[in-house]
Image (cartoon, rainbow, N blue to C red):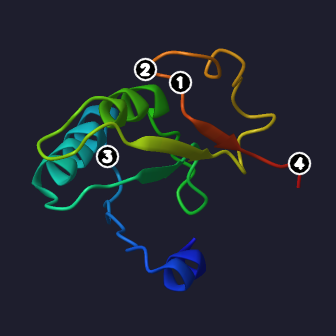
Amino acid sequence: LQQRCLETGAEWIELKVSVPFSSDQLVSQVQQFLSSHPRPIRLAVFDHITSNSGCVLPIRDLTALCHSPQGTQERISVCIDGAHTLGSVDIRGLLGEGETSPDFYCTNAQ
């Protein structure tokens, strides 16, 4: 994604989060970031399960947050990186329509 941003002139913004964290803390931190960012954000990408710490992120809550206007932000599309999810989390109930369903869900069977 960083390379594609360089190629297209898009801005890459990464929110650093310290572990451990609770789901509520993470959602609150993302909400504060979105509310304070001055320029429109078009796409938010979240890991479903983080590779370095194995944390399962609250993707329904994060997706709902991004799909609701925050400060200067309109609806933000959400892509979930589910590379470590298959066999660990049942994703069937996550996909579909609605404000808690991500716009894109990417995974693989490594």
Amino acid type, mark 1 = Ser
Mark 4 vs mark 1, foreground winner is 1
Front one among 87 and 32 = 32
Relative horizontal placement of residue 70, taking residue 55 as reference (left or right):
left
Q: Which residue is mark 4?
A: 109
Mark 2 vs mark 4, foreground winner is 2
Residue plotted at (63% across, 18% down) = 96
Disc with the residue nearer the chain's start (2 vs 3): 3
Report, in whole angstroms, how far the alpha carbon at label 4 lies from the one at label 3.
28 Å
Report, in whole angstroms, how far the alpha carbon at label 4 lies from the one at label 1.
21 Å
Amino acid type, mark 2 = Glu
Mark carried by residue 65: none
Report, in whole angstroms, how far the alpha carbon at label 1 lies from the one at label 3.
23 Å
Q: Which residue is mark 2?
A: 99
Whether label 1 touches label 2, CB < 8 Å: yes
Q: Which type of secondary structure does the marked residue at label 3 adopt? A: loop
Q: Which residue is mark 1?
A: 101
Q: Above or below — where is 75 with respect to 5?
A: above
Residue 105 % position (x, y): 66, 39
Q: In which quadrant will I find the N terminus?
A: bottom right
